[in-house]
Image: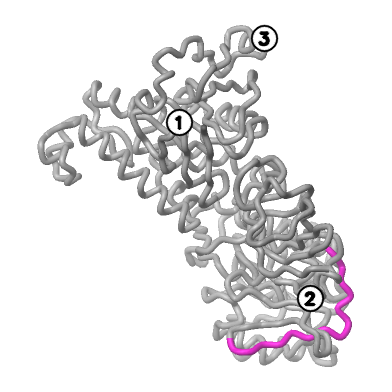
């Protein structure tokens, strides 16, 4: 009997437990796989080149009779749920970045999600973080043992001469005893343990960005993968528990960044007409907690729709400043915007202004943010009004801003609530009469005395009550089989799910005689294609 229990997801990366014939391992892990899978000793004809065409692969790839089941991008047999798959020759893919991503996408789209992935002879301390990030879970010692035979010292930064073992770089038992073989095995075990911790923290991406800088091929793989937005986005959570560290230009292409900007452009419904006020971001998040934005607030007093121009997110409407990742990102502050940042931010702003015209657009900006706004205005052929006379928070600038807003009407609160709900649920809800109330750290959206939504202090996302779900409609719904949930809902019980659902989304569970509210523990595609695992963390059940 085999089974896979996934404990934690971080994009394509997973931690969990795999059981095979009474033996269990916790992944990601590295081990002597020939002892765990005795059938590997008899495996033949499983080393078909990854570049082979479908005719060659189907002719020569022999179907495995036992786990791990060999797969090839052009020849994938029927894989049982809860099993282990092996991709022979994957170490070759590591030096072919474009093909790495092409082959990976092909394989991942054809193999069930509730499987364990084994990359034989591929893992080293310097690349195992990237391998796990791209969806591999199980590794062997072949790679590091080969480097030991070649007299190479393995570290997370790369391969070095054997005399490095004497330079007090590492204090492991192998280094203390002068045993290179022992050191190299210990190095990859340590890195796997660290990778697991970063998955639990939701920060594997940050670790991968740090590790891959020493290898051009790894950087190329990461960048090629980032451009597969349609493949990655359904597999990435809508929010994480840790800050997004935008410490390099690669952050501009992260799923979280592109998803936020895409929803601001295509889903978000701003207040109609009126005045758009472009403001600079602040180091402190959410922006309204900073001294500069408190000064802006005291001057604006709701007379304009505030839009924060920022890298890497592009544009953050004021009412979305608490939503992940707007309140959860960190970026090095240098005062300098490079061309990639300017191109990205200006493209987001120009698309937004083309989709949502305003009567007036005031640019209360300086430096790179102002340059990006000017580039956007030229692209979509709109006029900007300038109010900065020195730093945006200076008294002359604030006085000029106040003068520019003289005579403008205040924006209604329910218009801002409409924007929050449209960004999250992709629906234009009638927000007339709704109010946003705060009580300490808690926030609620209500109409009269009826509470419709609460707002998560952790992610900024709205959590609908049953009355709130009536307003959202059929969106973000999960239909289940004929049973009454006694706890969390497992994937086998899901009949259908809104294709827009991502891990971490609030969902409405609908059954024959019940409805429930909860949070998605996996994306819609995985709910429908998995045979094991929690699909929805149930919050409340209502029997009908």
* Helix, strand or loop at mark 3: helix
According to the picture, the residue beneath numbered tag 3 turns out to be 55
> CB of mark 1 within 8 Å of CB of mark 3?
no
User: Count of labels shown?
Assistant: 3
Front in this rendered view, residue 487 or 235: 487
Q: Is residue 97 magenta?
A: no
Q: What residue span does the magenta drawing correspond to?
A: 427-440
Front in this rendered view, residue 340 or 182: 182
* Helix, strand or loop at mark 2: strand
How far apart are the alpha carbons under marks 3 and 2?
A: 59 Å
Which label number is shown at residue 21?
1
| Residue 103 against residue 57 in the figure, above or below | below
How far apart are the alpha carbons under marks 1 and 3?
A: 34 Å
According to the picture, the residue beneath numbered tag 2 turns out to be 276
Front in this rendered view, residue 96 or 431: 431
| Residue 256 against residue 451 in the figure, above or below | above
* Helix, strand or loop at mark 1: loop
Q: Quadrant of residue 24?
A: top left
> CB of mark 1 within 8 Å of CB of mark 2?
no
Sequence-wise, which precedes: disc 1 or disc 2? Answer: 1
């Amino acid at each position: 009997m085999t089974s896979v229990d996934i404990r934690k997801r971080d994009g394509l990366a997973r931690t969990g437990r795999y059981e095979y014939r009474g033996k269990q391992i916790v992944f990601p892990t590295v081990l002597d796989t020939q002892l765990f899978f005795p059938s590997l000793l008899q495996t033949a004809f499983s080393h078909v080149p990854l570049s082979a065409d479908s005719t060659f692969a189907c002719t020569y790839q022999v179907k495995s009779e036992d786990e791990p089941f060999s797969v090839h991008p052009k020849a994938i047999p029927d894989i049982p749920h809860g099993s282990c798959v092996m991709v022979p020759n994957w170490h070759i893919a590591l030096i072919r970045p474009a093909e790495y991503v092409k082959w990976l996408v092909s394989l991942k789209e054809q193999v069930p999600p509730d499987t364990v992935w084994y990359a034989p002879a591929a893992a080293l301390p310097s690349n195992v973080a990237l391998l796990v990030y791209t969806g591999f879970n199980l590794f062997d010692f072949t790679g590091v043992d080969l480097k030991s035979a070649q007299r190479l010292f393995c570290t997370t930064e790369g391969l070095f001469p054997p005399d490095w073992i004497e330079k007090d770089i590492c204090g492991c038992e192998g280094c203390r005893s002068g045993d290179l073989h022992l050191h190299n095995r210990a190095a990859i075990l340590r890195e796997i343990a660290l990778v697991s911790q970063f998955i639990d923290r939701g920060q594997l991406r940050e670790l991968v960005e740090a590790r891959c800088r020493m290898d051009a091929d790894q950087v190329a793989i990461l960048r090629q993968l980032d451009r597969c937005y349609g493949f990655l986005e359904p597999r990435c959570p809508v929010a994480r528990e840790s800050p997004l560290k935008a410490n390099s230009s690669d952050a501009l292409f992260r799923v979280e960044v592109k998803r936020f900007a895409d929803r601001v452009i295509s889903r978000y419904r701003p207040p109609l007409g009126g005045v758009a006020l472009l403001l600079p971001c602040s180091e402190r998040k959410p922006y309204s907690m900073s001294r500069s934005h408190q000064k802006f607030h005291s001057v604006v007093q709701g007379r304009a729709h505030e839009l924060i121009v920022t890298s890497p997110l592009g544009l953050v409407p004021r009412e979305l400043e608490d939503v992940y990742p707007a309140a959860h990102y960190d970026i090095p502050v240098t005062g300098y915007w490079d061309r990639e940042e300017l191109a990205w931010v200006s493209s987001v702003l120009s698309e937004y202004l083309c989709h949502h015209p305003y009567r007036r657009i005031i640019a209360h900006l300086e430096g790179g943010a102002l340059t990006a706004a000017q580039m956007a205005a030229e692209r979509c052929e709109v006029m900007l009004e300038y109010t900065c006379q020195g730093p945006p928070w200076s008294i002359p600038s604030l006085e000029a801003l106040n003068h520019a807003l003289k005579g403008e009407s205040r924006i209604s609160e329910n218009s801002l609530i409409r924007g929050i709900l449209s960004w999250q649920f992709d629906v234009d809800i009638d927000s007339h009469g709704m109010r946003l109330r705060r009580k300490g750290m808690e926030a609620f959206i209500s109409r009269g005395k009826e509470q419709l939504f609460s707002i998560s202090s952790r992610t900024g996302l709205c959590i609908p009550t049953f009355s709130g779900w009536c307003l959202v409609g059929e969106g973000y719904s999960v239909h289940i089989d004929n049973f009454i949930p006694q706890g969390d809902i497992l994937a086998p019980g899901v009949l259908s799910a809104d294709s827009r659902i991502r891990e971490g989304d609030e969902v409405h569970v609908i059954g024959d005689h019940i409805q429930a509210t909860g949070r998605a523990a996996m994306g819609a595609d995985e709910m429908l294609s998995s045979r094991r695992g929690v699909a929805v963390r149930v919050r409340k059940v209502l029997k009908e």
